Image (tube, coloured by chain):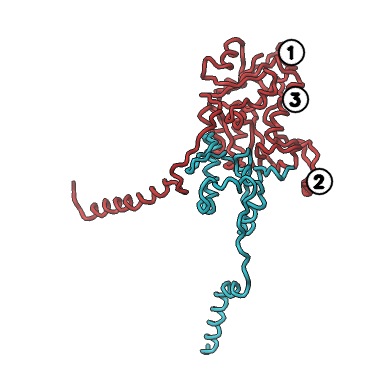
Chain colours: A red, B cyan
Amino acid sequence: MEKSRRRFLKVAGIAAIGLGAAPAINFAASDSHGSGAAAKVKNETALHAERWGMVIDIKKIDDNLAKKISLACHIHHNVPDFTHEVDTQLYPKTRPVNHKQEIKWIWKEKFHYAFPDKEDEFLNEKFHHLPFMVLCNHCKNAPCVQACPTQATFSREDGIVMMDYHRCIGCRFCMAACPYGSRSFNFRDPRPFIDETDPDFPTRSKGVVEKCNFCAERLAKGEQPHCVEASEGAIVVGDLEDPESDVRKLLKEHYTIRRKQSLGTEPSVYYIV
Amino acid sequence: MTKNMIVTGLAVFVVAVLSPFWFNLVTTTQAAPEPELLGLAKEAKTCVLDKYDMRANHMSLLNEWRGAVVRNADRIYVAANGHSFNMSLSTGENSCLGCHEDKAKFCDACHTYTSVNPYCWECHINPKEIQ
């Protein structure tokens, strides 16, 4: 190899950068508050799954139960209702309500909107009247996750597609990417439109996208999601990867469909029809 | 330009530059408020970190907590002193506000004094506020 002064200086320069960077990297990697022995762990009672999934038995749901299910979810997650009369004493500066705005986590949908690819000219009449409960499908290949520029929405290891409201910049790329319309945007501060605030769950702020989180906060405590509790047995959640789980047993026994399967997003919500 | 003008100009400049110091000499500063410990917090005696660490680093601790809870589903913090805490601002007895019952006296006192407006409470709920 040719040895020149120029080459020697080049190598020496690169080595100097390396030596200089090492302490800075070590500093950045160190724990900022020096609590070496501290640990962050899961609740002992937390429910675990390799991939969370849901089975909804549509035959067991009528209009009343559908209302009860979405109410249970919306009340406990402080989802605003824009038909709610604002308390003008508490929130004097609130502008009049635009009733076209809507935020929803789980709601009742007609068959031909929920399953447009399964629409049939001579479809059994009963399908037109069944209340299909729709929510975020927590897809295995979630397009919203791929679209999010800040990783505010992400797939957790257990298959739940989560929103990190702290990181959401409100660009709404995820809403455009979601083929199920499962996401809602907060065009305004939701607090005046919440009838009774549940202190156990934060509200959202203006400018963030929100959606169903599979009650991750309840699974972490070992409790079943609100919709499951309210559904009187019509909705079951469990581990899709575990052949012994309740959801897999239901999938074995019944014919089920999923929404817009042809898109390849691999939804984790199944419907028994 | 005369020598007098230059000296006068310099004097005005020095007075103007040092004006914050003069201002501090003639006015009295309010003493920094002590966060008040009430109820459970008063009995507990130990917090997540020791007092001085907590004063300096509580925001970076909260930042770590929110990452752990939302992104990793880890919700319990086992502190170096052996106590475990619920990593939450306001939900449950073992959370920040569960122990420090009065947000106004514990958080707001210092935040107001230092003109810091954390936006935590735009979403997180102070249980006392909704009563």
Q: Quadrant of residue A36?
A: top left
In the rendered view, tell whether residue A59 sits above or below residue A263.
above
Q: Are marks 2 and 3 on the same chain?
A: yes
SS of the residue under disc 3: helix
Q: Chain of mark 1?
A: A
- Horizontally, residue A216 falls left or right of residue B53, namely right
**Looking at numbered disc 3 in the image, what kind of residue is underneath it?**
Lys
Asked whether A90 or B84 is in front, the reply is B84
Residue located beneath label 2 in the image? A88
**Residue bearing mark 1:** A126
Q: Amino acid at mark 1?
A: Lys
Residue at image coords 71%, 27% = A70
Number of marks in the image?
3
Compute the Cα span from label 2 to label 3: 28 Å
> Mark 3 falls within which chain?
A
Q: Which mark is residue A67?
A: 3
Q: CA distance from mark 1 to mark 3?
A: 19 Å
Residue extending farthest to the front is B43
